[in-house]
Amino acid sequence: AALTDGFRDFLRKREAAEAPEAALAGAQKLEYVREKTGADGSVTVFAVQKPSPAGGKASGEGPKAAPVRSMLVFEKSGDSYRIREWLEECQACSGTGVCPACGGEGVTRERKCPECGGTGKKSGGAACEACDGKGILGPAACRSCEGDRGACRTCSGRGGLRRDVFDTSGLIGDLELKESGFRGLGAPEEAVKTYLDLERALEAVRCRAVAKFTAELRRMITGYFPKDALDKFDAAVKRSTAEFQAGMEGMRREIGRARSEEGAEIVLVTTETGGITGESHRELMYFRAVLKDGAWKIADRAGMCRDCLGDGSCGMCGGTGKKGNEACPACAASPGKCAMCGGFKYQWERKASD
C-alpha cells in the first residue's frame, strides 16, 4: 500500500509542477491493476492512468483520451522503494509484445497475391511474377519482425516503452544574467537599447522561474528514483545550462544609426550569438521609433524573415522571378521577391496596431 501510494503521490506532484491547472482539476485517475514480486525482491506494479474529460469534469463534456497503461518496477533501497524502471504501454502491439503483423509466429500466413488478385495471371494472360502463377503468397519470414522472431520491433517484445523520468529539454540550473540597467529615451537609438535591456531583464526573471522548477523536479527524482536517474538528470541539466549561458554570454549586438522614414525613425540591430560549440548565428531586427510626450518610444518591431534570411528575394528563383522559361510559382504575386515578407526582409513581431 505504501509503495503504490508513494507513486500516486509522485504523479500528483509531477502534474502540479508541470501543469498546475490539470492537477487541481484532478485530470489523472490512477488505478492499480495488480502487483507481482520478482525473485530479486523487486516489485512490479501494473497501473492504468485514466484521464478525466477535459477540465476534470465528471459530466462527460469534452474529449475523452484513451487510458494509458504503465508498468513500474520498484527496487528496495534501504527501508523504502525506488522506481527502477517505468514503462508505458507500446501502442504498436497494444502492450502484448507480439508482432502485430504476424501475430508472434515470425512468419506470415498464406494469403491471396495482391498483384494478381489470386488469379495467378496478369491482365495480359502472362503468369504473375510475384506469386509464380500460384495466386498465393507465403508462408514467408515476417518483414516487420525479421530477426526478432515474432516480437514487436517497436518495444523489442517487452510490451512497453521506457519513459525518461522527465524531459530535460529547456531546463536550466541557477545562473546569473547581467543587465546594463540602461533606461534612456532621449534618442531613437537609446529607446532601442532600453527595449533590449528590458527584454534581457524579463529573460532573467524567466530563468529564475525555470531554475526553481528544475530544482523541484530534482527533489522529486531524489525521492522516488534511484541515484543513476538523478545522475542522468543532473548531467542533462548541467549541459543545457552551459549551452544556454554560453549563448547568452557570447551574444553581441550592434545598434545602427537611426534614419527617418514616414514620420518615424528606423533603427536596425544586428545580433550575433555564439554557442558552446563555437558556432555563430546572425539575426537582424528592425525597430520603428516615434517621438511621444517628449520621449522616444518603440512603436513597431520586426525580426529577420525566416524564409529569405533577410535577403528579401525569392529563394526558389533566386530573385529572377523566372523558373526556366516560366514565371516562378513561389513569387508570382511579387516577381523576384520573397513570398513571406514581400521583399521587406523582415516579419513583424509586434505592431502598435495589433
Image (cartoon, rainbow, N blue to C red):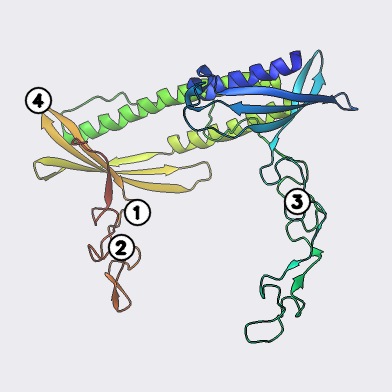
For label 2, the crowd category at 10 Å Cα-Cα, with few meaning under 14, some 14 to 19 and many 20 or more, is many
Where residue 139 appears, as percent x and y from the top left, is 81, 65
User: Do the residues under discs 2 and 1 have CB atoms within 8 angstroms?
Assistant: no
Q: CA distance from mark 2 to mark 4?
A: 41 Å
Q: CA distance from mark 3 to mark 4?
A: 72 Å
Q: Which residue is mark 1?
A: 309
Mark on residue 314?
A: 2
Q: CA distance from mark 2 to mark 3?
A: 48 Å
Q: CA distance from mark 1 to mark 3?
A: 47 Å
In the picture, measured across the screen, residue 108 lies left or right of residue 22, that is: right
| Front in this rendered view, residue 345 or 53 | 53
Give amino acid for label 4.
Asp
Closer to the chain start, of discs 2 and 4, is: 4
Closer to the chain start, of discs 2 and 1, is: 1
Give amino acid for label 1.
Leu
Q: Residue at x 66, y 82 (%)?
A: 122
Q: Residue at x 28, y 61 (%)?
A: 313
User: Do the residues under discs 2 and 4 have CB atoms within 8 angstroms?
Assistant: no
Q: Which residue is mark 4?
A: 293
Q: CA distance from mark 1 to mark 4?
A: 36 Å
- Taking the view exactly as shown, the residue that stands out farthest to the right is 39
Give amino acid for label 2.
Cys
* Image depth: mark 3 or mark 4 in front: 3
Task: Report helix, strand or loop for mark 2.
Answer: loop
Q: Which residue is mark 3?
A: 99
For label 4, the crowd category at 10 Å Cα-Cα, with few meaning under 14, some 14 to 19 and many 20 or more, is few
Task: Report which quarter residue 7 is drawn in.
Answer: top right
Closer to the chain start, of discs 1 and 3, is: 3
Q: Quadrant of the C terminus?
A: top left
Where residue 230 appears, as percent x and y from the top left, is 68, 26
The answer to whether residue 201 is visible is yes
- Taking the view exactly as shown, the residue that stands out farthest to the front is 119
